[in-house]
Image (spheres, grey):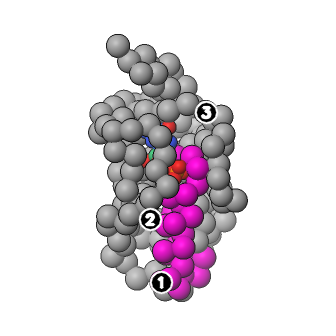
Amino acid sequence: MPEFIPVIGKDEIQRQLSRTAKAISTDYKGRELVLIGVLKGAFLFLADLVRQINLENIKIDFIQASSYGADTISSEKIVLKKDIDIDIRGKDVLLVEDIVDTGLTLTHLIRHLQNFGPKSVKVCAMVDKSERRETAITVDYACVAVQEGFLVGYGLDYAEDYRNLPEIYHLKL
Ligand code: 5GP
């Protein structure tokens, strides 16, 4: 039987989300911001985050890269499954990711987005998992930081299960 060890509870998620949304609202005051959610894992986080960001000019888009599939080990081969629809040339972009692990996915996505000539590209992650980082990526806005473990819940899946859990758990198989 898989074991679910609670890591980040509902209240803590909401607290950190409010703090992050405030920082984004302050930093992008008076500017137009395009939030790009990385599917599928960031769907809940982005939905909650965007409702707390206090900016007048926000656009939302999504991008999807290949994920772990049914495995819990990061793949170095990243394939783009869905590209953005909005024209981001000259725009401030915030890439919203569920979890940054090795950093390879984000490095790939940032390089891809730079091809469209945005004014800036920054990163907001729900979870910054540092133990296996392989790239010198900057997570500009990190909601919560964890050392290790395979996490599920609040958008994060294992073989497409558990995304609906309202809290974040360490899954032990
Ligand atoms: P990276 O390229 O940074 O190694 O991995 C990023 C992607 O791998 C995330 O967007 C997420 O889909 C997946 N991932 C990394 N760590 C975890 C984890 O602990 N749990 C789950 N469910 N997915 C993870």
Q: Is residue 107 visible?
A: yes
| Stretch in magenta | 92-120
Q: Looking at the picture, how far across and down is residue 47, in whole percent?
A: 39, 51
The answer to whether the residue bearing label 3 lies less than 8 angstroms from the nearest atom of ligand 1 is no
Q: CA distance from mark 3 to mark 1?
A: 34 Å
Mark 1 vs 2, N-terminal side = 2
- Compared to residue 38, the image places residue 92 above or below, namely below
Residue under numbered circle 2? 36
Residue under numbered circle 3? 148
- Give the crowd class for mark 3: few <14, some 14-19, many >=20 residues within 10 Å: few
Residue under numbered circle 1? 116
Amino acid under disc 1: Phe
Instruction: Identify the residue shown where x is 65% and y is 58%.
Output: 135
Instruction: Identify the residue shown where x is 45% and y is 59%.
Output: 77
Mark 3 vs 1, N-terminal side = 1
Mark 2 vs 3, N-terminal side = 2
Q: Nearer the viewer, residue 59 or 141?
A: 141
For label 1, the SS is loop
Q: Is residue 158 magenta?
A: no
